[in-house]
Image: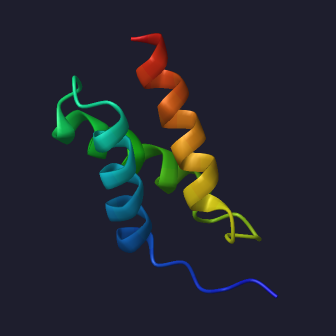
Amino acid sequence: MATELDADDVITQVTESLSTKFPQHDRGDVETRVRHAVDALKDRPVTDYVGVLAERAVKKELTAD
């Protein structure tokens, strides 16, 4: 059973996690990237893993920078 997605909460949690792991990146930039990733995923039928998928996508971007 899918749970209801609180996109703002996911964005806050993922931004905090990635800002801690990548302190050399501007927190605002990290949040913008996370917001875009969450927005791309939030309307999918199953939203249970939006946070994990968004974090992985943005982590990959930040690692490549």
- Label count reads 0
Residue 56: percent from left, percent from top: 59, 39
Q: Quadrant of residue 2?
A: bottom right
- State left or right for residue 31 relative to residue 39: left
Residue 4: percent from left, percent from top: 59, 86
Image quadrant occupied by the C terminus: top left
Q: Residue furthest right?
A: 1
Residue 26: percent from left, percent from top: 17, 31
Q: Residue furthest top?
A: 65
Residue at horizontal 70 percent and vertical 63 percent from the top: 44
Residue nearest the viewer, comparing 14 with 47 = 14
Residue at horizontal 44 percent and vertical 66 percent from the top: 10
Q: Is residue 63 above or below residue 44?
A: above
Residue at horizontal 46 percent and vertical 18 percent from the top: 63
Residue 8: percent from left, percent from top: 35, 70
Q: Is residue 23 above or below residue 45?
A: above
Q: Quadrant of residue 60?
A: top right
Say how the picture is coloured: rainbow
Image quadrant occupied by the N terminus: bottom right
Residue at horizontal 57 percent and vertical 63 percent from the top: 42
- State left or right for residue 6 relative to residue 41: left
Residue nearest the viewer, comparing 26 with 23 = 23
